[in-house]
Image (cartoon, rainbow, N blue to C red):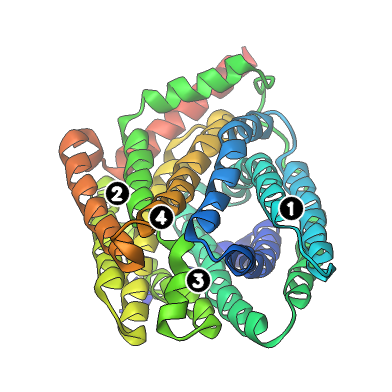
Amino acid sequence: MSRRLGLDLSPLRTSRDYRLVFTGGAVSAFGSFITYVTIPYQVAKLTNDPLMVGLLGVCELVPLLVMAFVGGALADYLDRRLLVRGGEFALAALTGVLLLNALSDRPHLWLLYVVAALAACVDGLQRPALEAMVPRLVEPEQLPAVMALQSLGMQIAQLGGPALAGLLISAVDLTLVYAFDLVTFAVSLTCLTLVRAVPPPPAADRPSIRSVVTGLRYAKSRPELLGTYLVDINAMFFGMPQALYPFLATQLGGPRILGLLYAAPSVGSLIATLTSGWTSRTHRHGLMVLIAAGFWGLGIVGVGVSHTLWLTLACLAFAGGADMISGIFRSIMWSQTIPDHLRGRLAGIEMLSYTTGPLLGQLRSGLMARTRLGVSGSIWLGGVLCMAGTAALAVALPRFLRYDGEDGLARKKAADQAWLAASAS
């Protein structure tokens, strides 16, 4: 049973470059999640307004809408490793700006929004290259295991980073919190420097509006890919209440609780990841994404109606586990079925799908919390709307519901072979 359910570590054993990318990414993510918690806390402390916290999502969303397409086009034309490493340098510099701002006697609120927007720009340029690079470092049959390992690194960061952030915020000055994140970038940059070059595919398309449109047309032609985007956007728009965590923490026990709220979903996600061996033997990927999205909404409903800390944390953990199952199957669908010469551009579109929903969801939850619904009402109603939207998408997307992963993998192999043949001729 443990072999069937346990995590497959073979990609870490067989690929040196993937080991480096995994290690550097996990360490960097740990520090980044500390900052991810600290910026909303600092905005809440300066303004005491949930809408102002929610507006951080708007500042991040607008740059992403443009830069994700640019980053995707560049990832299909340039060395993907260089793009990822350049992004780490830029994010480290922005963290340094946050540190200097925290050192001032009167930190500037506007600077927090500017840094959030610039970080989103960098993320839009870097993330497609990273997601397009990883499948090149391992064998195709190892991709389900790689998706689980990527999730593991992220969940450890999401679990430990916010928890440590809560302790640091309550015990020390914010400058030390940002300084910790800055140190983690040294590890990730060292690892990325040691990774061998990842050149673009043969006869790569030059970055242009036309190449971006080519990626969009391909995504539109694949109903199963559209399904992954729409289901996740629906779930996150209605069921992402993170903008309300600072205020929910106040109701449940104070700043030290804040880290627990951010970390609780990662407990469920970590459990789901560590028992994800079964995902490589499940081929109804679309069905599993829909089921998991429905359970995510159910967990968020529980968060909204709960008035005790332990039940709130349990519901967040349940929701986090469901979201991780959805994420694993969506990532498998993307990695196993998209031709390599389009991987960067499609990664940019994927990035918009899994970032647009949460960022808009923060604004939605902040706006609804200012009405008579309050913080709790905004959360539970969002969970109900998430489940309703998931059911509607299951009816509206029958091909996504019936999608079989084995057929998708065969289609990708045929598309890659056709591209190589056309390039050679």
Q: Which residue is mark 4?
A: 327
Q: In this view of the protein, which residue sits in the foreground, 120 or 128?
A: 120
Up-down: is 19 above or below 117? below
Up-down: is 425 above or below 98? above
**Foreground disc of the pair 4, 1:** 1
The amino acid pointed to by label 3 is Pro
Q: In this view of the protein, which residue sits in the foreground, 181 or 286?
A: 181
Q: CA distance from mark 4 to mark 3?
A: 26 Å
Q: In this view of the protein, which residue sits in the foreground, 276 or 248?
A: 248
Asked which secondary structure carries label 2, the reply is: helix
At x 58%, y 29%, the residue is 341
Tell whether label 1 touches label 2 (CB within 8 Å): no
Could you classify mark 4 by the number of other residues whose Cα lies within 10 Å: few (under 14), some (14-19), or many (20 or more)? many
Which disc, if any, is residue 246? Answer: 3
Q: CA distance from mark 1 to mark 3?
A: 20 Å
**Foreground disc of the pair 2, 1:** 1
Apparent side of residue 310 relative to residue 71 in the rendered image (left or right): left
Q: Which residue is mark 1?
A: 111
**Foreground disc of the pair 3, 2:** 3
| Image quadrant assignment for residue 188 | bottom right
| Image quadrant assignment for residue 80 | top right
**Foreground disc of the pair 4, 3:** 3
The amino acid pointed to by label 1 is Leu
Rendering coords of residue 36 (x, y %): 61, 63
The amino acid pointed to by label 4 is Gly
Q: Which residue is mark 2?
A: 285
Rendering coords of residue 209 (x, y %): 61, 17
At x 28%, y 68%, the residue is 299
Tell whether label 3 touches label 4 (CB within 8 Å): no
Q: CA distance from mark 4 to mark 1?
A: 32 Å
